Image: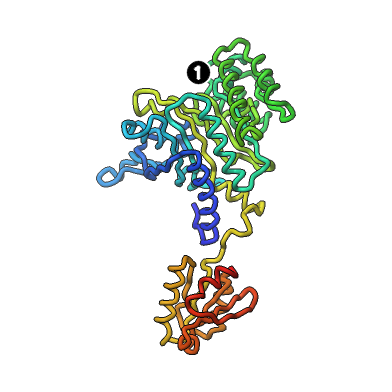
């Protein structure tokens, strides 16, 4: 959990602004939910490992010493969304599309780009099982990343039923699929040998079969999506649900060929995603030379039903704001024009007698749309200039006795050293013209 200094906040606001702008252009509406949920709302939705990472809030008052928890900090934005849809279903449109940018908390082990408190940027569509939903979500995510300057990224695509089909074809019963998927989800972290060892340790396969199973889920970036689909159909060995899932993947590839996501789609049979609520398509966004992903998501048609009692189709994708910021900072991806100064102009104070007039000038410039700081003390003018320069403020105004008598203001450009005396009404125009 971190503090964010002004430059950090400006970068965060820039990225969030790009994300919100793109999502609004796709017709998604904003939503916010509380930081705290009832603990039973969250438990059992993220798998065994996820449940261990939930920040529990102990009971208060007379039960404070019981050690029991009845509330918890929000773990993600998807489960709270499902609760909201169940609670306000009658007030929401049939096809509810929302985006949400808020912090979540996980009792995780901090590492590079991974924190205990972090922001998620979610976009979800509720109410339709059409694969057009997946195509639109992936297009929106691709537009966001391209808008931020990412070019070489891959959208890894898979399907939960494809995973089930491959596991069943390998002789692993459905009751053990959850454990197997948790292990397979670590392929990019511990490699094939590490996953094979975990599968054996959990008693899911014999040592001689582990390498073959991991190989079945392997991927080769040189293969086309069509070649991967063909291989999957052969590996399914007649598994009907798995074959239907392969058809879904093929349709998603076809639909995204018409939008910005198409060039980035890569079918990846090794993609598992550990969260237990996914029921269909799943996806993650990867960039070269980065461990982990920039975001991920999938279809979760049964989650809302846990709260509502009837099924509501749903699909969504979450972008990891913190990791995006880390990558953009390391790779110098923030635009040069991104404003880092706290103000466009600083109004100096010539003397205690002119302070009121200086404040009035600041108000006039703010009314013209400029960001204006005021040096609070009548220090030596050179000291005031030096302070403005240290803050990255390019312009300063001087309203001395002579200028005030003539209804004029001196404006100095600290970048060039040029100084002009102009009528008071023309100060904002001069700054904008040379800014």
Taking the image as shown, residue 353 lies to the left or right of residue 285, namely left
Which of 323 and 138 lies nearest the eye of the viewer? 138
Extreme right residue here? 222
Which of 343 and 424 lies nearest the eye of the viewer? 424
User: Residue 371: x and y, percent?
Assistant: 49, 67
Q: How many marks?
A: 1
Extreme left residue here? 62
Residue at 46% of width from left, 84% of height from top?
A: 407
Residue 172 in view in this figure: no
User: Residue 315: x and y, percent?
Assistant: 48, 30
Is 146 above or below relative to 224?
below
User: Residue 132: x and y, percent?
Assistant: 52, 27
Is 373 above or below relative to 323?
below
Residue 160 in view in this figure: yes
Secondary structure of the residue carrying numbered label 1: helix
User: Mark 1: few, some, or many residues within 10 Å (few <14, many ≥20)?
Assistant: few
Residue 232 placement: quadrant: top right
User: Residue 162: x and y, percent?
Assistant: 58, 20
Is 375 above or below relative to 263?
below
How does the figure colour the protein chain or chains? rainbow
Quarter the C terminus occupies:
bottom right
Residue 211 placement: quadrant: top right
Residue at 65% of width from left, 36% of height from top?
A: 154
Identify the residue position indicated by label 1 in the image.
Answer: 175
Which of 164 and 203 lies nearest the eye of the viewer? 164
Residue at 62% of width from left, 55% of height from top?
A: 335
């Amino acid at each position: 959990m971190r503090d964010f200094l002004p430059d950090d906040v400006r970068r965060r606001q820039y990225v969030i602004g790009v994300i919100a702008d793109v999502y609004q252009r796709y017709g998604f509406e904003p939503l916010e939910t509380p930081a705290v949920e009832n603990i039973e709302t969250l438990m059992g939705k993220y798998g065994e490992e996820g449940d261990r990472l939930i920040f529990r809030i102990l009971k208060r008052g007379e039960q404070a010493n019981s050690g029991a928890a009845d509330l918890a900090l929000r773990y993600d934005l998807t489960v709270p969304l499902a609760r909201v849809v169940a609670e306000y279903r009658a007030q929401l449109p049939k096809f509810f599309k929302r985006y949400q940018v808020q912090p979540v908390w996980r009792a995780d082990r901090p590492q590079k780009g991974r924190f205990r408190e972090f922001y998620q940027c979610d976009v979800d569509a509720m109410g339709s099982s059409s694969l057009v939903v997946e195509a639109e979500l992936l297009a929106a995510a691709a537009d966001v990343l391209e808008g931020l300057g990412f070019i070489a990224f891959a959208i890894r695509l898979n399907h939960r039923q494809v995973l089930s089909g491959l596991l069943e074809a390998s002789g692993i019963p459905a009751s053990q699929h959850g454990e197997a998927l948790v292990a397979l989800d670590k392929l990019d972290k511990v490699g094939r040998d590490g996953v094979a060892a975990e599968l054996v340790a959990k008693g899911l396969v014999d040592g001689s079969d582990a390498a073959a199973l991991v190989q079945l889920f392997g991927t080769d970036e040189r293969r086309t999506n069509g070649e991967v689909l063909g291989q999957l159909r052969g590996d399914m060995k007649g598994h009907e649900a798995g074959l239907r899932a392969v058809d879904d993947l093929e349709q998603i590839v076809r639909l995204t060929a018409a939008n910005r996501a198409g060039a980035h789609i890569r079918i990846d049979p090794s993609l598992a995603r550990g969260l237990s609520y996914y029921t269909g398509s799943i996806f993650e966004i990867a960039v070269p030379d980065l461990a982990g992903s920039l975001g991920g998501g999938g279809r979760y048609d049964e989650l809302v039903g846990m709260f509502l009692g009837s099924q509501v189709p749903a699909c969504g994708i979450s972008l990891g704001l913190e990791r995006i910021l880390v990558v953009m900072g390391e790779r110098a991806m923030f635009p040069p024009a991104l404003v880092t100064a706290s103000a466009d102009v600083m109004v100096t104070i010539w003397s205690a007698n002119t302070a009121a007039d200086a404040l009035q000038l600041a108000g006039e410039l703010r009314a013209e749309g400029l960001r204006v700081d005021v040096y609070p003390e009548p220090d030596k003018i050179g000291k005031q200039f030096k302070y403005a320069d240290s803050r990255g403020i390019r312009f300063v105004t001087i309203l001395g006795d002579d200028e005030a008598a003539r209804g004029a203001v001196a404006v100095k450009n600290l970048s060039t050293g040029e100084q002009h005396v102009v009528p008071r009404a023309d100060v904002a125009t001069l700054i904008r013209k040379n800014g």
